[in-house]
Image (spheres, rainbow, N blue to C red):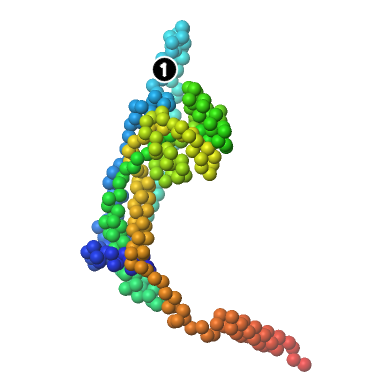
Amino acid sequence: MIREELVRQEAAKRGITVSEEELNKAIEEAFGYFPNGTPTAAPTATSFVTPEIPAEAFAVVSVTPPPSATPQAATEAGSTEEAEAATATTAPTNTAVPTAGPTFTPQPTSTPYTADAFQETLNETDEGLLKFGFDEEFYRSFFKTQLLEQKLKDEITKEVKSTETQVWARHILVADAVTAEDVLNRLANGADFGELAKEFSTDTGSAVNGGDLGWFGPNMMVPEFEAAAFALEKSGDYTLEPVESQFGFHIIQLIAKQERPLSESQLSLAIDVEFQKWINEAREKYSVEVFDIWRQRVPNTPNFVTAATESAELQLTAQAEALEQFISTETPQP
């Protein structure tokens, strides 16, 4: 209720409204009724395009190119004769006569969902809600609030960027500071980072790949690791001091850093986070207070224990009377 009220007040302040036409359309779609035909999925506003890997990254790690789909020509001596023998034309075989398959039976088509059918469904919904004390205005208000929130959300999050700065890094994780210093000394003397990761890193998932963690953006790593990784600027740079986290001690090397587009799911999450941030700030701004006034409106007599006890006693009495009646009718009279 608090969220809905915040949305209504902010929407009114910004002049955001929902027309009757928009409301009716939302209700129709919720019930699966599309008078103008079922809509097709609209393409996303921006397609996900993976940027080219920065050239400087190749100086740090070697990127394996995808395998070629073109078969390689034979180079060994005598390959020509072998190829000719292997490609000898085979004798034709008798043509198989296709057998008649089962006749396809057309499936019945679904009955079109007409305006009358939709109205009938709506009437049944109204009748069902009335049994619980709700009327048509209840669900219309619900859908209106949903539309208001979506419009407000679009307005508040319109500045959310569809890209973010990401880093491609690798690391060596060790259990103690002494081992971390030993690894740093080896790096200073020209040892290969990837080979050291395979030898020393306790992060078995990345160690087999030379410590490679791939691309990651903000809020994807523990704070200490993230701060150190994003502080590196040039490809090949690594942390000159061990970075301590809850997992141990890290030596982190930057492979590349660039602005990269968010995937559709990442962008959706970023929008949700931004809108929830506004909700939290609005609660503080409007000094939302929650009162337990419902306690003053709910009767406290009889209480639950009393009501449950009385109900159980009545049920036992009824069962006893029914049993007595059954015995009296089934017992033969002298």
Position above or below: 76 against 41? above
Q: Is residue 110 visible?
A: no
Q: Nearer the viewer, residue 330 or 117?
A: 117
Query: Which residue is at the front of the view, 248 or 264?
Result: 248
Question: Which residue in the rendered view is the most extreme toward the top?
Answer: 77
Residue at image location 34% in from the left, 47% down from the top: 267
**Horizontal and vertical percent position of residue 36:** 25, 57
Quadrant containing the N terminus is bottom left
Q: Residue at 54% across / 40% down in the picture?
A: 248
Can you name the residue that lies furthest to the bottom here?
Answer: 334
Among the 4 quarters of the image, the one containing residue 313: bottom right
Q: Residue 228, percent across and down?
A: 43, 39
Provide the residue designation for mark 1: 72
Residue visible at 46% across and 43% down in the picture: 224
Task: Give the number of marks.
Answer: 1
116 versus 295 height, above or below: above
Question: x, y (%) of residue 171?
Answer: 48, 34
Residue at the spot x=46%, y=9% of the render?
A: 76
Q: Position of residue 90 (x, y in %)?
A: 45, 17
As drawn, 50 above or below 7 = above
